[in-house]
Image (tube, rainbow, N blue to C red):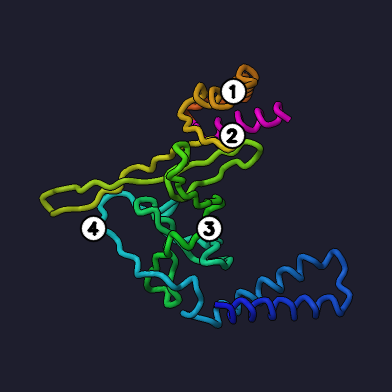
Amino acid sequence: MFRTVTLIFAIVFLCFSHEVSFGQIQTEKDSQQLTIKNTVSLYYKSLGEQSGIYRGTGYIGYPYQVSNGHQFFESPDFSKGTIFYDGMLYQDIPMWYDLVKDQIVVQSLDSLSMISLHNERIDYFSLFGHDFKKISQDSSNSNSLTTGFYDHIYSGKTEVLVRRYKGTLEDVSPEGIFTKILKQKNEIYLKKEGKYYSVASSGSVVKALGNHQKEVLSQLKKNNVKFKKDPEKATVMMVMYYDQLSN
């Protein structure tokens, strides 16, 4: 692992030195960063199966054929994402997020199989434009969240996080037993001054915020946003406005 990291830094340093020696100006910084990114990506590909991102276990589906829905976040098809895994940042990785098992799955190099990554080695990942960070439960703190990946949909003075998950149900029919994937559920949390609050209504949001309650609620009315119709949008709007008023 040490040799791998050393070699990557050596490649990046050579690329950087090459650009500087030719007097690159400010407007060419983006080109330089792209060069470094491509160099590192080529290095990962050259490693093949030795690359850390491909070290996991074979992805195991479900005991019965899925008859309804799918277990993944957003789409049953993979999307290229970014993941910080085992101390390394990997970009443009074909991956899925299994919401039933709370498991990150990547496509193997042969494009024929899938690999489940080890959750304990994942710090964060981005997929479909969403930024998920791992939170580990603190057994000594009753206010701590359950260990898992949380979608950070707003990060300001006050944070808004969402825990996304799906459940399963065994569906027995004359044709046999099938697995039915239930509708996705989303639990919204606020993080304010180091404490977490579960929110499920506009009333619970303003209660957690404490101050500027009337102003925050009026912001929803002003923009004609209904909490029941779009709870995540409403929560972000309320918290963002609260942060502005607090500043």
| Residue 73 image point, x, y percent | 43, 51
Q: Do the residues labelled 2 and 4 touch (CB within 8 Å)?
A: no
Residue type (three-letter) at the residue carrying disc 1: Gly
Q: Give the range drawn in magenta.
A: 230-247
Residue 210 - label: 1
Quarter of image, res 243: top right
CA neighbours of label 4 inside 10 A, class few (<14), some (14 to 19), many (20+): some
Whether the magenta-drawn stretch holds residue 222 is answered as no
Figure quadrant of the C terminus:
top right
Residue at 35%, 54% (x, y): give it: 101
Whether the magenta-drawn stretch holds residue 240 is answered as yes
Residue type (three-letter) at the residue carrying disc 3: Asp
Mark 1 vs 3, N-terminal side: 3
User: SS class of the residue under badge 4?
Assistant: loop
- Gap in Å between the C-alphas at discs 1 and 3? 31 Å
Residue 109 - label: none
Q: Furthest residue to the top?
A: 214
Figure quadrant of the N terminus:
bottom right
Residue type (three-letter) at the residue carrying disc 2: Lys
- Gap in Å between the C-alphas at discs 2 and 4? 43 Å
- Gap in Å between the C-alphas at discs 1 and 4? 48 Å
Residue at 62%, 36% (x, y): give it: 158
User: SS class of the residue under badge 3?
Assistant: strand
Residue 65 - label: 4
Q: Nearer the viewer, residue 37 or 191?
A: 191
